[in-house]
Image (cartoon, grey):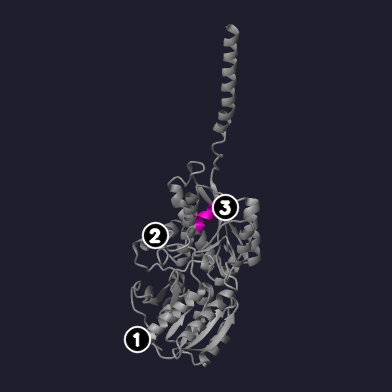
Amino acid sequence: MKRSLLYAIVAAVIVVAVAVAFVVPSLFVQRKEAPREIVVGAVLPMSGSFSQIGLYFKNGFELYFSEVNKNGGVYVKEFDKRIPIRLVVYDDESDPTKSAAQLERLITVEKVHLILGGYSTPLVQAQAPVAERYKMPYLNPGGATSTIFLTEDGKRRYQYMFGLIASIKNLALTTIEMLKQEIDAGRLPKPLKIATVNENTDHGREYLSGLKEGARKYPGYFEIVYEAFYNIGEKDFTPILTAIKQSGANAMLNDMRLGDYITMHRQYTTLGLCHVVVSYGPRGPEGTAIRELGKAAEGVFGVQWWNPADPRPEVQAFNRKWEAWVKERNLNLPSDWFAASSYEAARTLVWAIEKAGSIDPDAVWKAIRTLNSPQNGLKPSILVGGVIYFPEESGGQITNPFVVVQVQDGKPVIVYPKESATGNFRPNTC
């Protein structure tokens, strides 16, 4: 009897020991250890020809991350806690070769958890293959050329690329549509004789292609009488401006970087040129340009992805946040689309982390891919169109509309489309 009781006790002990052997280890592997912070890397042009825009992007990212951190950080379900988020920026000096190398260094040496995209078509084109190679989702707030997203036969070029600003081709087509509306209303001459000067990049070539496509759509409305390309950073536009003066053009539609626009338009004004229509593609009504050009900026219009003149309450709230942010840091950066697109890229990344419940790049990538249409997009958004999405058919590039913004009485005024307009287009008096 005693022996059988002993056997029973031993058996019970064995059962308990086996159960503990299975249960106890599981108590220690329920969760991975959470990182102290989520580190996000970005390679930006903090020096060189695009340095001012690099500063915009850095501050746009940081503004949103600061808002997140005020609430304790990003909630990550995998760790069941909020984790602060920190930005690490490497400078590519506005050089595409350095841009690619710096992004690789961020990923392999700095070992950032995730990345955000850079600015300007040439630099984004350099970074994109690196992000693809390391399978890092790349939210791109600063490269709009279609060739970043699509191959020549219309297939998606990069699986990990997601663009927050619509294509340069659509920007050019929007320009044509707005001008046709003004011609039909009798406010502009028909045909409109166009001189066009474009940066010697895929960006500039796409703009010119879009203008020509739009002009073909409306026979008799538009005639391109002069076209030229220039190299980014050009300091002397006198030969080009002289040729424009001799071309008989009554409209000038260019595609230029902000600094090049300011340089050319100063020389344009000095030489006494005047056209009833003047645009520098997406440039024209930026606060920096208005400040530096003064009265010379009057009448210039740009076709933009966002503008601080947008009366939507969420846009005006962003303007106030941005102005307070830059004032506190003594930065001379008026509210502009560079700030808005970078802020929204950072917001989309944080949304994707929370959606995925993880900081694993593959999980975050899968979360971003669910934003594949306006119906499934992230909203509301301060961007024009009010939603962030990345359709497959455009290679992951957003297809939101544009606003046409003209400098009037020293301020940006939205003149197109009608539903967004805060004023009417004013042809220049020459």
Q: Splitting the image into 4 quarters, where does residue 151 fall?
A: bottom right
| Residue with the mark numbered 2 | 380
Q: Residue at x 51, y 43 (%)?
A: 78
Give the secondary structure at mark 2: loop
Q: Foreground mark, 1 or 3? A: 3
**Res. 269 in view:** no
Under mark 1, the amino acid is: Ala
Q: Splitting the image into 4 quarters, where does residue 308 fall?
A: bottom left
Q: Which residues are magenta?
A: 362-369
For this view, does 42 lie left or right of residue 418? right
Under mark 3, the amino acid is: Asp
User: Does the magenta run of residues contain 368?
Assistant: yes
For this view, does 304 lie left or right of residue 2? left
| Residue with the mark numbered 3 | 362
Q: Say few, some or many: other residues with alpha carbon within 10 Å of mark 1 (under 14 / 14 to 19 / 20 or more).
A: few
| Residue with the mark numbered 1 | 185
Q: CA distance from mark 1 to mark 3?
A: 52 Å
Note whether 366 is above or below 204 in the view shown: above
Q: CA distance from mark 3 to mark 2?
A: 25 Å
Under mark 2, the amino acid is: Pro
User: Does the magenta run of residues contain 387?
Assistant: no
Magenta stretch: helix, strand or loop mostly = helix
Q: Are marks 1 and 3 in contact (CB under 8 Å)?
A: no
Q: State the image coordinates of residue 93 (x, y, percent, origin top left).
A: 61, 64
Q: Residue at x 53, y 53 (%)?
A: 364
Q: Nearer the viewer, residue 176 or 405?
A: 176
